[in-house]
Image (cartoon, rainbow, N blue to C red):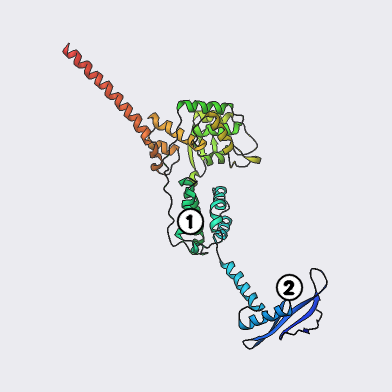
Amino acid sequence: MPTFKRIKTNYPGVYYVVGTSTATGKPERIYYVRYRKDGKLIEEKAGRQFQDDMTSARASRIRTQRIVGDELSNKERREVKKLAVRAEASRWTVDRLWKEYKAQKPDLKGIVTDENRYQNYIKPLFANKEPKDLSPFDLDRLRLNLLKTKTPGTVKNVLELLRRIVNFGEKKNLCEGLKFTIEMPKVSNLKTEDLTPRQLSNLLEALDQDPNVQVANLMLLALFTGMRRGELFKLIWNDIDFERRFIRIREPKGGPDEQIPLNEAARQLLETHPRTDSPYVFPGRKGGMRTDVNKAVNRIKNKAGLPKDFRPLHGLRHVYASMLASSGKVDMYTLQKLLTHKSPQMTQRYAHLRDETLRRAADLAGELIQEAVNSKREEQTS
């Protein structure tokens, strides 16, 4: 490395050497300062003539500031930067926790939906914050702002995702947990969607006419079996036992595999359903598992003239359950098993339909008995 000649200036402790500009290749002064601090002699660069717009006077002011401690020396700045880098590396922000959470749970159910929730609602506010820095006010503001445009169910899902991320970090000893309980919006899960006979007829006609046979049959199977959206997406041909007439439901709602009967309507539908090289009954792109069907099912829903708040797939599951319950021929325990509900509480939303059927039957029995009594009295008085 060449040795440059030191050239003194009119300012004590300030000199320069003539180097080469990295931008133009022309000669350029490089200023240095010398001073003592805490008994130690310090000699360091102040800056370049053109690149840093440095002069002898400016270099002298820098020297004075560093002597009195108003400005850190170059070495001190490097140490501060190192400490900052180390501190940042030890910080487990919400964004860093989310990335680690995904890395450790690559096959997590619903990860695509969770990613959208994170990117749209959590990341803009909390990405660079550590969980210990979050306050009840932060979460209240998020909840109240979301409730202006989103349903309570959507808001609850967003808040639960944030809680899941923080709980993951705390469990792995990566960060401190929240010191407060997140207030969740009240969500009513008792909505039971149903269709009138006319609406059901219009839907069946729209399904029959739709050119997308895969989606039309997927919706029909939801109606015939009450299967959930995700269960239909995951359904493979090996899950269907045509001989014993069962459908295997893999991990319903994250629980153990279950079986439901393959009824005659579903059997006929599946036996005539077009097969592809894919193992999936209703394959998505390139034969993989389908992940979305909203565009097609909403087209069919609109053509059938169904209510705007009717959810095409989950709503058909409700129609299936409602028809069975209102028939009066299926008890709640059997309906629970058909719907693969983990607890009878979920099935109780349909109990009023069965009760109404029983009430009508009881009223009919009362009328028949009353007619018999009246008839007997008339015989006695005649």
Q: Residue 366 or 315: which is nearer the viewer?
A: 315
The residue to which callout 2 is attached is 53
Q: Nearer the viewer, mark 2 or mark 1?
A: 2
Q: Is residue 147 above or below residue 88?
A: above
Q: Residue 96 or 74: which is nearer the viewer?
A: 74
Secondary structure under the numbered disc 1 in the rendered image: helix
Identify the residue at horizontal 51%, vertical 61% (top origin).
Answer: 169
In the displayed orientation, state which residue is furthest to the bottom. 39
Q: Is residue 268 above or below residue 229?
A: above
Residue 85, image x and y in percent?
Answer: 61, 69
Three-letter amino acid code of the residue under disc 2:
Asp
* Quarter of image, res 297: top right
In the displayed orientation, state which residue is furthest to the left. 381
Residue 380, image x and y in percent?
Answer: 17, 14
The residue to which callout 1 is attached is 163
Which quarter of the figure is the N terminus placed in? bottom right
- Distance from label 2 to label 1 (Cα)? 51 Å
